[in-house]
Image: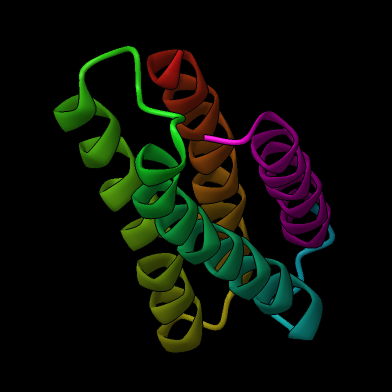
Amino acid sequence: MILWFAVVLIAVALVGAVLCLIAALRKRGPDDFTMGATLLVTLLLLAQIVISIAAPFAGNAAVGDPLEFWMYLIVAFLLPPAAGFWALVDRTRWANLVLAVVHLAVAVMTYRMLVIWG
């Protein structure tokens, strides 16, 4: 796992969480900004999957339990599309709150993946 990429992923997830939380507090439904933040986090997690596959071949193997790392990564990757689907179905302000919680969860899970990687 690359440190700077993990920091960027955590920062983007936290900015997305704040953006979605502000939209929820303003009682707005999901829009291009909140859904775009979710898409960006999903794409960064997809890139993290590619990095995690290639890193051991480059000599950067995980120090911790690889199974635990991959379970965190798979669940973190599945959360934003599920929340995005929820936001497309439920166009109320509560969908933005769900997106905010998912972004916070991805930030925490990414930090945990960084700790597991070593």
| Part of the protein shown in magenta | 1-24
Count numbered badges in the picture.
Answer: 0
Kindly identify the residue that appears in the image at 81 percent across and 55 percent down: 19
Q: Measured along the vertical axis of the image, is residue 104 above or below residue 20? A: above
Kindly identify the residue that appears in the image at 58 percent across and 48 percent down: 103
Q: Main secondary structure of the magenta part?
A: helix
Quarter residue 113 falls in: top left
Closer-to-camera residue (34/46): 46
Residue 17: percent from left, percent from top: 70, 47
Kindly identify the residue that appears in the image at 73 percent across and 33 percent down: 7
State the colouring used for the structure image: rainbow
Residue 104: percent from left, percent from top: 58, 38
Quarter residue 8 falls in: top right
Q: Measured along the vertical axis of the image, is residue 34 above or below residue 48? A: below
Closer-to-camera residue (76/53): 53
Residue 117: percent from left, percent from top: 42, 21
Q: In the figure, is residue 110 to the left or right of 89?
A: right
Closer-to-camera residue (83/92): 83
Residue 35: percent from left, percent from top: 65, 77
Kindly identify the residue that appears in the image at 46 percent across and 42 percent down: 58
Q: Measured along the vertical axis of the image, is residue 76 above or below residue 113? A: below
Q: In the figure, is residue 68 to the left or right of 48?
A: left
Is 70 magenta? The answer is: no
Q: Measured along the vertical axis of the image, is residue 45 above or below residue 6? A: below
